[in-house]
Amino acid sequence: QVHMVESGGGLVQAGGSLRLSCAASGRTFSTYAMGWFRQAPGKEREFVAAIRWNGGSTYYADSVKGRFTISRDNAKNTMYLQMNNLKPEDTAVYYCATVAVALRSTSIASMDVYDYWGQGTQVTVSS
């Protein structure tokens, strides 16, 4: 089992920044990749960004490229999402997730492949 806990959400004005954290505990030695997803009211959960735990390759949704940066601290088993130039359309509950099996790049954005999820943290961007 892997336990995931997100933090860092909040209310920010458009153009502002927030940094989300996701701390993993438990069987973290088998982590292959971690990702961020978000779900806005009335919408489906969508991919935001992902990072391979070894090597650090990163992947982003087109909607956040150039504004969001994903990173990880292997020693702390923690993943981060630095969000800059936030827009009202970024308002959502942000979830982190982890997967233990190797994935192709084409699969890393799929929710279905992730094994463990956090409870989510609310990000609200006011206009």
Image: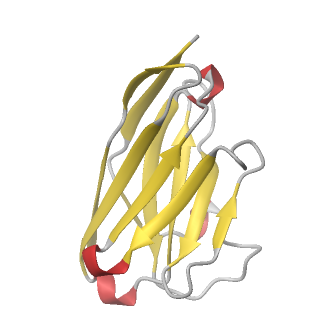
Residue 98 in sight in this render: yes
Q: Nearer the viewer, residue 71 or 33?
A: 71
The C terminus - image quarter: top right
Query: Is 61 placed left or right of 118 in the picture?
Result: right
State whether residue 52 is above or below residue 6. Answer: below
The N terminus - image quarter: bottom left
- How far across and how far down the image is residue 98, in percent? 44, 70
Q: Residue at x 44, y 37 (%)?
A: 18
Q: Residue at x 58, y 30 (%)?
A: 86
- How far across and how far down the image is residue 4, in percent? 30, 61
Tell me where residue 3 sits by quadrant: bottom left
- How far across and how far down the image is residue 120, in percent? 37, 44
State whether residue 104 is above or below residue 108. Answer: below
Query: Is 23 placed left or right of 97 in the picture?
Result: left
Q: Which residue sits furthest top?
A: 127
Q: Residue at x 77, y 73 (%)?
A: 106
